[in-house]
Amino acid sequence: MRALWELLAVAAAVAAGAMGGRQPPHDTLTCSQGLACRLLDTDVLCGTEPPGPSHGLTLARLRLEPALRCTGPTACSPCLEARLRLAGAPGTGTGDPRHPTPPGSPGVEDGSEGEQRSTADGAASSQPNITGLLLLSGHAYAFSRCVAVEVRALLPPTLPGQPLGWVTYRCFTAPLGSELHVTAYTNSRGHRRLSQRQWVPDCSWPAAQAAVPQCQASGAVPRLRVSSGPKEVVVEVQGAAAGHSYTLRLYRNQSHGTGGPGRAVTASSPMNYSLPTDEVLPCLCLQVWPETQDPLRATLCPFSHDAEAWERLWARSQLVLHVGGRSLTCSLSSPCDLLAKLVPCWQPVPAGPCQALPGLQQLAVGQGPQEFGGLKPHPNLCVQVWSGGQVQLTQCLRDRALPGRPDDVLLLEHGGNASLCALERGACTPLASFTSTGAGHPGLLERELRRDVTAGQCRQIWHPENSTGGTLWACPLHKYRRARWALAWMGVLLGAACLLLLLLLKKEDVKGWLKSLRADYGSEAPLRGRRALLVHAVEPAAERAACTLLSALRPLGLAAAAAPGGGSGAAAWGPLPWLHAQHRRALRDGDTVILLLSPAAAAAARRWDAEARTVPDPPDVPSTAPCEVFAAALSCAMPSLAAGAGCYVVARLEALVPAVPPALRAAPAFALPSETGGFLRALAAPGRRRGRWPEPYVAVVAEGLRRALGE
């Protein structure tokens, strides 16, 4: 029987050569008894594998072992040997289950013992054909290579998933001390993909010391030393041979790329390189090698346990939540690979504690989106990133337009409505003890919440696919709180009625109170006999505010004129003569001059003050354009203000003018509408100013100004 297997193996090798498969002399392929295999191509473009048969073949295990590829006793190069165990796919067993294959028979070997050349392709033509196209890819920092192998099972498995045997490929070449990423998969979709990383031994490997030429040169591999400072990190190359050039490479070691992005620096020994601390991350690695053929590389990743580097990494990481699909999805992006957990949690109060949802946490995998299966978005849902026993990142859905309300309560149901409990304060509280509504009586809403779950009034947030987990429900509480507020308002109204009854019982006190009201609000025209001149700039905001002030002050008895726009036709002479006449009359009769500060008026006051400062002893007031009304008014008012004569009041529109210009600070100023009370007191007679101004008048004037200014 053994001679027959050897004959079949020789026939398979001859058939492989006849079919024209490209097979370099250094690559070898062996398979265990029961399998026939051959190399189709040793240089396939990764991702564009050739089509081929794939029926009933699945991958079970991948193992990598260091090996040497030699052309002579001292002319060897390091490589990795890939051993792959194959099994029959479910549903491919066609043998008689009453007579299973005994242990140790061909097709069930699980080890390196008994590994032989394959038999001929047609040795089991009478049996069902189980074939497959196997792809092996090897990726290192300097190359990427894919190999195509055709595998055929000579004897079918008697049971689905039964091992078929081992296929050994020798080998993927890589430099000493480098890392190799090997992946095995078939050309059919949905089958299992195996992946493994393995370091190639360096010169400390006894088998390489006498066989690899690079290990025989003294001082071939330099050493790296890293010194950290407050602003930079110094990388020092030590042990380098004098007069030789070396390459220093800095890269980020990431699983989703072959060595990660980086940069290389070339210099002669001795060599120091400064790196800013902002670029130092936990996955930053260093490599150095001499500028020779097939050099040995010294690799160092010194920052994997650096606390500051981890803080810098988390500051540059980002967690994004997506709610476009049927389930909540998140993406964790970071410059380095992260060993972290994604934990969905419930946070009813902003900046409050976030309670983890049971059975939904999962490991962060890669940089792409990850879905929490069956978890529906809700405004109170958040996702936390846990690493090292601490919360590093948190992202919530609070500001999204989603179904549900922030005051919803989260209920956990285990095996039926009778086992409902509320998730709060880090525990699941039975509804019989639930008091989050503030009613003060535990279990007050137990019956209502159970009824809402049964009637479909609650929203199902999560339901597990298996029957082991519990269901999460978000139930509204606002309808119960509305009923509670209605009771509270009834209590307030009842208290007000009792207070009114108490006041009526004390008639004398009530009469005194009514007299004080009549004294305050019963007097008509509190500004009767007072006159004022209102000066404002020609701009829409000032004109609206001036009209509002005149309309509100005239019912109070104040006789007011506005400039421009008043004066019995005298304004037709031009603003300056008319303003001089009005100003002289106000000073003579003791009237109040109101200077209304809008943006244009404040700008005119600042220009007036600037022109006054440019000339030390001006012979006259600063020049003013004839049509600038407020500037003309300043030419009248400033001499009187400087002499302390006349009664001036500055009214500043606080929403438009932040401060009073220096030229007008000699007069009392009031911000409208917030200081309306003080403004009215300044317009009143001296005796009236000392009393309390009636609040209704203040409110009417202030509200009119707010509407005029569009607030």
Image (spheres, grey):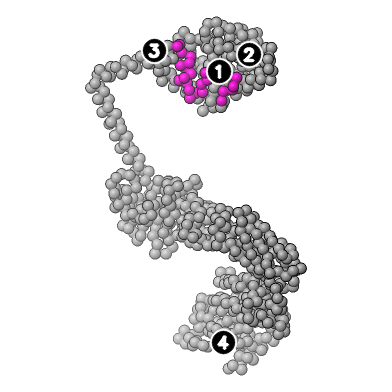
Outermost residue toward the right in this view: 243
Please identify the quarter of the rendering in which residue 268 is found.
bottom right
Q: Amino acid at mark 1?
A: Ala
**Image mark for residue 113:** 4
Relative to 620, residue 378 above or below:
below
Mark 4 packing: few (<14 Cα in 10 Å), some, or many (20+)? Answer: few
Viewer-side residue, 177 vs 374: 177
Residue 408 in sight from this viewpoint: yes
Q: Amino acid at mark 2?
A: Ser
Q: Position of residue 212 (x, y in %)?
A: 69, 79
- The residue where tag 1 is placed is 666
Q: Which residues are magenta?
A: 659-686
- Residue 666 magenta: yes
CA–CA distance in space, label 1 to label 3 = 33 Å
- Residue 156 magenta: no
Single out the mark in the foreground, 4 or 1. 1
- The residue where tag 2 is placed is 635
Single out the mark in the foreground, 3 or 2. 2
Q: Amino acid at mark 3?
A: Ser
First in sequence, mark 2 or 4: give its number.
Answer: 4
Mark 3 packing: few (<14 Cα in 10 Å), some, or many (20+)? Answer: few
CA–CA distance in space, label 1 to label 2 = 15 Å
Q: Position of residue 50 (x, y in %)?
A: 67, 72
Circles 1 and 2, Cβ within 8 Å, touching? The answer is no
First in sequence, mark 1 or 3: give its number.
Answer: 3
- The residue where tag 3 is placed is 523
